[in-house]
Image (cartoon, rainbow, N blue to C red):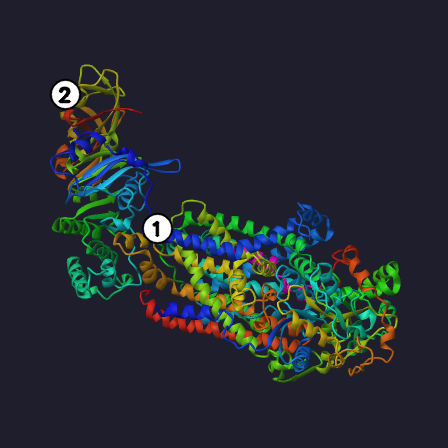
Amino acid sequence: MRCLALLALALASLLPAAAEAQQRTRLMVYTALENEQLQPFKQAAEAALRDIEIAWVRDSTGVITARLIAERANPRADVVWGLSVFSILQMEGLEMLEPYTPVGADALRPSMRSDRNPMTWTGMDAFVSAICFNTAVAQQRNLPRPSTWEDLLNPAFRGQIAMPNPNSSGTGFLTLAGWISRRGEAGAWDFMTRLHDNIQQYTHSGSSPCNNAARGEFGVGISLDMRAVTLRNQGAPIEIIVPTDGVGFDLEATAIMRGTRNLAAARRLADFAVSRPAMEVYGRYYALLALPGVEPTVRGYPAAFAERLVDADFRAIAQERDRLLRDWAARFDGKSAPRN
Amino acid sequence: MMSDAALSRPRLSLDQALMRGGLWLAAGFLAIFLVLPLGALLMRAFETPQGGFAGLANLAAYVTTPALLVAAWNSVWTAALTALIVVPLAFAFAYALTRSCMPTKPLFRAVMMLPLLAPSLLPALALIYLFGNQGMLRGLLMGNSIYGPIGIVVAQVFHCFPSAALILSVALSTADARLYEAAAALKASRARIFRTVTLPGARYGLVSAFVVVFTLVVTDFGIPKVIGGQFPVLATDVYKQVVGLQNFNMGAVVGLVLLLPAVIAYALDRWATRQRAATLSGRAVPLRPAPRRARDLPLLALCLVVAALLVGIVGVAVWGSLIRFWPYNLSLTLDNYDFTRFDAAGWSTVWLSVRMAALVAMIGSVIVFTIAYVLERGRQDGALPGMVRFAASVPLAVPGLVLGLAYVMFFNHPANPLGFLYGTLAILVLNSLVHFYTVCHLTAVTAIRQLDPEFEAVGASMRVPVWVTFWRVTVPICLPAILEIAVYLFVSAMTTVSAVIFLYGPDTKPASIAVVHMDEAGQASAAAAMAVVILGVTTAAKLGQLAVGAVVGRVTQAWRR
Amino acid sequence: MGASASDAAVTEGAPTRAAYLEVRDAGKQFGSFVALQRVNLAVQAGEFVTFLGPSGCGKTTLLRGIAGLDPPTTGRILQGGRDITHLPPSDRDFGIVFQSYALFPNLTVAQNIAYGLRGPAWPKARVKERVNEMLGLVGLAEHAPKYPAQLSGGQQQRVALARALATEPGLLLLDEPLSALDAVVRLHLRQEIRSLQQRLGVTTIMVTHDQEEAMSVSDRIVVMSRGRIEQIGSPAEIYTQPATPFVASFVGHSSRIEAVVDTPPGTVVAQGVRLPATGARLMLYGARVVCFIRPEHVRLHPHDAAPAGALMATVTGLEFLGPVVRLSLEAGPLRLLASIPPADLAALGSLADGKVAVTLPPEHLLVFPDDV
């Protein structure tokens, strides 16, 4: 009998505590933001919206997107806050987003907000593909410091470069998209074919090239700009290089999920996400913000950073995504024996 | 005469009805938490992304992708190579544990379990520290890269060793001494006895060890993802399709392909069971090895080497959790254990994991053992027992990613009355339980089959209901096995990643997921630290099992002389 | 002469008293394998009946059918006038001892015996009393707190017996209860089982493949072969008047002789050897028969003092068995076994050259039509 009681107790503890007082509206927010950004973002939002509580579900872009789509029949997320615009556009195509133009969204840069009316998403900031360059390894192996993508074709880099597999990682696709936007498709394929000779590994994870470049596993990792901060803080001899010959960029965006049970609260969070106080928080981590006139406080970015971004038509690229990835896989995936 | 009455159906007794009802419940449980979700997902292999019927188009598309054959072949040969390395090694290790008189056996038995106790990221990190491009021992690879098949096989050997060694030590511990005496009396050489008695006796164990290792390697995606570089295998193909491309249809196709090993494994297992039934004699005399230096010393040396390798790999990871930044700042620190610096949830993920794992262990051991009991001891007529048996063997072959995704789609469906489970701890618990079901089921079945088949008949002849016999006899005798199942579930639930990554909610993030997140964020030392904390918890559970086992043993196992 | 199988049940089961246990036309099929074919049997209250036969003859199947563990596919079983054919074991009234004993290894001897003593009818004090009574009955009083593994095989067997009898069942079923024990313990225990059974008067059915065991304890023996009852009868009937060639060859030793009925009536010819046989008197001329003769019925004479009609035989083997000596003989084409007291062997005085004269008393030659 005692065992039964124990079991009953165990079962009871499985269900969410119903007695919990619920004065505040709890918003389920799915995100792919970096771990260390969650707390500041949440604090800022909750300070501005006193009756809203943010409950994060955070994972890598791929996992979160897969989850959102898998949950499509019965969405659990109220808001997506901090997810690649490519994923957002994919969900837009699946009619998963609740149209809503947040108050003040018209002030955002036109390229960094939805072109629909009412809007389906709003941008937060831009992040770019970049080169994580390990200076210690470079010294050891006599690698020149690259300042452009073109520089990576130097035979000195043979077997030294890692980049994310675009089929596994959004970062990989972003990089690919940047090259295509800059060089045109044929030029991009030609560039990648030549780069392929220098690649040591196409990784499954988008963060792995930079993380492993920081550990000296690779001399060069192609990844995202904001990766490097955490790594440098830990003492990694790593330099983040934003190539001068045009980089692909991605937006972090906010959207309301269609079918949310807390629409009013979700709208207020969407309003907040485009507000100046929110932009100031974004500016602690990102160099290019969606709202003009807010000065980012993040350090270490070149002054003319914004000029290096390629002109990207996100929707056009998103529509070509499947084909581009198939082509990429046919050219570079699984065909080559692993390089030593 | 009343011969017409001969046509009447036999009436089920309360006991039999109860067992049958239990079996239906078991079937219902497995249907709701395994077959239906999995079926719903795998059905997508035959659908278009819009939900229309695609027939075999997805399969055809996949088969014509040149990468498929490469990935499938890679999966098969790395799995086979791993099994070919692990099974003999584990056999020698298990042989030393069961058939030699070497000292400190319990210690080796404990060390053997180490790889099971840690999240799979831990050996992967250790291998990078050891054999990576900056690795301390990279010279040993003679210019080859750890990223790729070498890394996969080495990490999988480490990862699969305990499973194989466990199965084989069980197989080797049930030897009939009389066979050895007979062979010795016939003047057979030691080598011949080994070949003609020992190996055939362990045949069943060898087959199932091989099958388990092969299946584990084929379905695991954690290791190839971290250390496999760009080396494509089927499991990373699933990852690519689901996480990279959000193409659930193709993900389902690959998942379906991955079920093939399960079917083969099931067939092999049934075959081996039949072979075994024929050779099992009723009254075996247990074999008690006698000391012999020529055998014991080499085996001791081998065990020391294996144990040193296992401890070494874990040791490197522990060291990795104490340094500031590999490989540029090797000063020691405890900061990595201050998890709030890396993840707002901090240590709370650990407590959540412990709570979840404890629930999986408690609920799971009850469910697994009860289902195994009604399956083994209930009437075997009809198709139901066979179906339940097959269902119980499926989870081994289902990649966690596929099961996790299946749970999302099934339990989150608006029409599912069990939808309230979604997003709670309960769904994590159930998912982990089902994910690790097969091994537990096999343990329970083995334990139950060792009982005299007439216990229930004796009880019935005295009008003692079957549940009384179950409670007073079966459960106490099988308590060590039940404890084993509980701890296995606890340990697995503490370390699992792939299935729960789709299912955790804002308040239910397990520590094993936190490890992955920290590693992704570039905080390798913190990830190692969290992995070491998990290892600490699981080791404590394992030691707890030994302690509780000793106490419980004294109380309930007094009858074992 | 013993009656054939189905008659036996009727002629011997029908009389004045109603049978305690009746098996009517019971059959059992596992897939296409027929384990039991229309078996009929009646057991009187207090009787000790043994199912005897080689392995696979269906004796255990029949026992399990009676216990309700594997109910028959056809036919009926009645116990005390109640139709129990399809009753589950727990609704029947029997105690059972398995070959493996199936003692609960985690319960002490006392707990094992007390296992079935539960419910309102068995308050603690009464259980204790009953357990002690049973322990005394099987002579294990001082072993009560021990676990089965600490007992010898014979002691375990007695615990199983005590456990089966503790609930005072109307029927005791014993499935090869002695086969796991060594010869001396076996001999001793089977007498103990018999005396216990007689003291308690419990109707008992035992399954065994050991004919000596069956002979020594049973009131009646049911000889079975290939799912059929060959003969039911007292040990003496089974031995002296086997109903079928199978029984004649299976129970006790005998020499088998294939022959053809010849003239004059009461003569058979076996591979050219003419043998007078009383049992062949009513058989048709030319019918193929099999004859059996028990070793103790073969008469030996010194070869130089052979009576008329004696066969000359060579001694090919000799076994000393204590009370008797068994000889293997070749008499022309016939191979015979003979057993004689050792003293008579000396009287034959013929072993030096290995020759001996043999006569087969016509009244002891068991003759059966050869159906095959």
- Identify the residue at horizontal 85%, vertical 77% (top origin): A305
The answer to whether residue C119 is above or below residue A128 is above
Say if residue A111 shows up in the picture: yes
Could you classify mark 1 by the number of other residues whose Cα lies within 10 Å: few (under 14), some (14-19), or many (20 or more)?
Answer: some
Identify which residue, A15 or C97, lies in the foreground.
A15
Q: Which mark is residue B494?
A: none
In the rendered structure, the answer to whether residue B172 lies left or right of residue A298 reads left
**x, y percent for residue A146:** 85, 73
**Residue bounds of the magenta highlight:** B208-231
Instruction: Residue B134: name its quadrant.
Output: bottom right
Are labels 1 and 2 on one chain?
no
Identify which residue, C7 or C260, lies in the foreground.
C7
Screen quadrant of the C terminus of chain C: top left
* Mark 2 lies on residue: C308
Instruction: Residue C269: name its quadrant.
Output: top left
**x, y percent for residue C99:** 28, 50
- Badge 2 marks a residue whose secondary structure is loop
Amino acid type assigned to the residue bearing label 2 in the image: Ala
Read off the chain for label 1: B
The answer to whether residue C316 is above or below residue B332 is above
